[in-house]
Amino acid sequence: MSEPVLVAVAWPYANAEIHVGNLTGSYLPADIFARYQRLRGRQVLMVSGSDSHGTPITMRADAEGTTPLEVYQRFHQGFLEVFQKLGLTYDLFTSTHTENHFKISQEMFLALKENGFLYTNTDLQWYSPASGRFLPDRYVEGTCYICGYTNARSDQCDKCGNLLDPGKLIEPRSRVDGSTPELRETEHYYLDLGKLQDQVVAFLRERESYWRPNVLRQSLGQILVDGLRGRAITRDLDWGIPVPLEGWAGKCLYVWFEAVIGYLSATMEWSQINGQPDAWQNWWLNPESKAYYFIGKDNIPFHAIIWPAELIGAGDTFARRMNVPDPRPMVLPHDVPANEFMNLEGQKISGSRNWAVWARDFLSRYDPDPLRYYLTVAMPETKDTDWDWEDFYKRNNDELVATWGNLANRVLSFTNKHWEGVVPDPGELRPEDSELMETIKAGFETVAREFEAVHLRAALAETMRLATEVNRYLDVQAPWKQVKTDKEAAGRSIFTALWAIDSLKVLFAPFLPFSSEKLHTFFGYSQPLFGTQSTEVRQDAVAEHTVLRYHPGEASGRWEPSQLRPGQQLNQPSPLFKKLEESVVAEERSRLGA
């Protein structure tokens, strides 16, 4: 049995459209990685959903004069549309506003309480006299007392990345009306992070050799400097998951306590949908399982500190509460490959200024694979990067079209013209043919190494380098000239090139699934590379919701060089990509900020 791989993807707040920075930050890298793992034949489960309970949703509902439920459901539908068009293969994309998620989150709360890692405390929190209510963290902004950033949220500073003590915020202001809130006493449950600190540090130390520096800096680095202390996990709210205890009416579980539990609850929902209610245990209780969390850098503390602390604190008690016959502690994150931010034309992306490339708008004019390609080559894996329309135009034409697309199209078209679309018999291969084949075969190892380390930019760069090697081979062999004087030699060159292209198709497939699937059919294969997606409406006691599901095909485990044989019948090819006109640069730039 192959090892289970959990691909856990950041939950988008259901209050705003998705832009390219969101895609390259977490959603796209997760899909690329999941597709690679499926090609390796591993038991992959990619889960996420809309974060329905965050204060950004309630703030938008307040501004629109509507309900959080209406806001969440509207944006959730938009997410599903974008993810389907971009080909993101969630085994389940659900939401946190489901009966299942309510139950699992409450069970985690009770497991932590049973194990002695929760305590109550009466503390001072921000209260708005103007609106007569306590203000959740994101309702209050002010100046960060650590770095001086003037637009820090009361619970976290987006500039320095530190978790903040809301009471220490400098010059606080309500985001609702700009008024100055005041601190008032309120009682809440706290996660005792101080009691869990040694175990969290040990967990991080075990991963110190391969985690990204930015992740370690915002997790282990912060703990060693400041230490951990209790953090409130309940709030005075009427939108969210109720605290499962008598006498706590009017209080809900804090969104960042329960949202991360969504990875677990989504796995359990997927198991239920598939009629295998115990299947979730393969990814959460199996010590052979590896869990990867794809997030942006602003979410590092919650995934590298708080979520591991919740899992450690729950121990095997959660599994026991779920009536698992052999209860075990849950699997901790193997890797948290958090990305930095993507900017736009040298400026920070801003929805309020319409300074963004919106995913749904982009996909109304362009194909998905060019977007996937550019977002990968410009992926902010180690530092902030920039979306530049001229760079997008040039990379589309010079790399995607010229280096890869034209290579595949001209070789297939040439075969169709001179060999009636039948793969020629090469006879005995020449040293130069074998050399190219060995180079491509080695690429399955070199590209895989980059994938295993979640170096997706490097994996794509290595794949494109191999495509360049095939172009160089053809430049030297020149079968277009050989065919006029020595068709047998030309056939040998074409067979070698076809074999290389058929192999490269697999290496490109995680990045460029639509064009790779298309190329797969040009080679005459009947079994698809990947499965299919679908949406379905789920009836639920909390709220009816629509989910996106990926249905795996039967062609997994294809991470290997081509098995192309002489005599194989090819299909009529067509161009894989569209060459763009230079005018698109000015046209797209004119849309920005409009």
Image (cartoon, grey):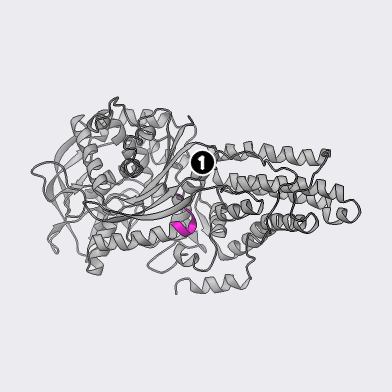
Magenta run includes residue 87? yes
Visible in this render: residue 315? Answer: yes
Q: What percent of the width, then of the height, locates residue 158? A: 36, 52
Does the magenta segment cover residue 394? no
Query: Callout 1, which amino acid?
Result: Arg
| Residue at the image position 53 percent from the left and 41 percent from the top | 556
Q: Where is residue 135 in the image (x, y as percent from the top left)?
A: 19, 56
List x then y, in percent, for residue 584.
Answer: 58, 71
User: On the picture, is 280 further left or further right than 106?
Assistant: right
Please give the range of residues in magenta.
84-89
Viewed as shown, does residue 522 lie left or right of 566? left
Nearer to me, 418 or 248: 418
Extreme-left residue of the structure: 247
Q: What element carries label 1?
A: helix
- The residue drawn where x is 50% and y is 45% is 553
Q: Seen in the image, is 131 located left or right of residue 404?
A: left
Residue at the extreme top of the image, as rendered: 326
- Give the answer, above or below, for where 591 lies relative to 323: below
Quadrant, the C terminus: bottom left
Observer-nearest of 558 and 103? 558
Residue 10 in view (yes/no): no
